[in-house]
Image (spheres, helix red, strand yellow):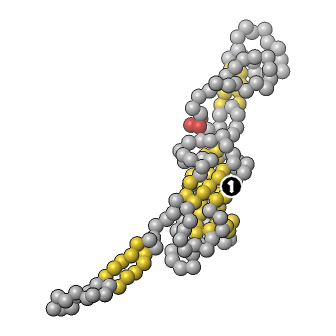
Amino acid sequence: VNYLHIVWADRAGNVGQQAGHYRILRGGFRVSSPSHPNPDMWYQNADAVFNWSTFPTASGYDALLDQQPNTVPDETNAKRLSATTIKYPNTPDGEWFFHVRPILSVGEPVVEHVKIRIDTAAPVVTSSTHPNQELWSSQASATLSWKVNHPESVGKYYYKVDPNPTTVPTV
């Protein structure tokens, strides 16, 4: 919130003793995702959470999660909320955008957008030397490769070779 204060002076240079005041409500509000704090990173957490600061004159908020970067949420496409937090459990993999708009009785709509990235898929492993996992091989060594949905989401790979079919490698 800012205010414009103005006084006037007559042609003789006498400045008025009373000021006119005008309140200016401007700018946005802060929106964040504690579950996905960095919009440029990929997270394995599919449960997205968003929080935002209270907008002083809002009677509520329209909130929406979609895959478009600039959607304006409104009463036709969004959830109408009085709270300043929302959870989207089991969000599918991909790049998502959260949009929130305070519901105002007057003034221009203020919309904030937050990007999150989710990648929960396990790597897909294939072998050029053992293409069929169901067949025994007499080869002494194996060549394996793997692919992930979003290579930019990978920081490191960990692997382990053992006789257990469900091992999850640890650091």
23 w.r.t. 30: above or below = below
76 w.r.t. 16: above or below = above
- Locate residue 88: give its quadrant: bottom right
- Locate residue 163: give its quadrant: top right
Q: Answer whether residue 54 is visible to the viewer in this image.
A: yes
| Residue 160, position as x, y percentages in the image | 70, 19
The residue under the point 57% across, 75% down is: 104
127 w.r.t. 61: above or below = above
Compared across the picture, whether 70 is left or right of 77 comes to left
- Type of amino acid under label 1: Lys
34 w.r.t. 126: above or below = below
Compared across the picture, whether 47 is left or right of 27 comes to right
Badge 1 density bin: few <14, some 14–19, many ≥20, Cα 10 Å: few
**In the depicted view, which residue is nearer to us: 52 or 111?**
52
- Locate residue 24: give its quadrant: bottom left
| Residue 129, position as x, y percentages in the image | 72, 16
The residue under the point 66% across, 50% down is: 48
Residue lying farthest to the left in this orientation: 12
Quadrant placement of the N terminus: bottom left
| Residue 44, position as x, y percentages in the image | 66, 40
Residue lying farthest to the front in this orientation: 17
The residue under the point 26% across, 88% down is: 16
Give the residue number, with chain letter if any, for mark 1.
87
| Residue 69, position as x, y percentages in the image | 56, 57
Quadrant placement of the C terminus: top right
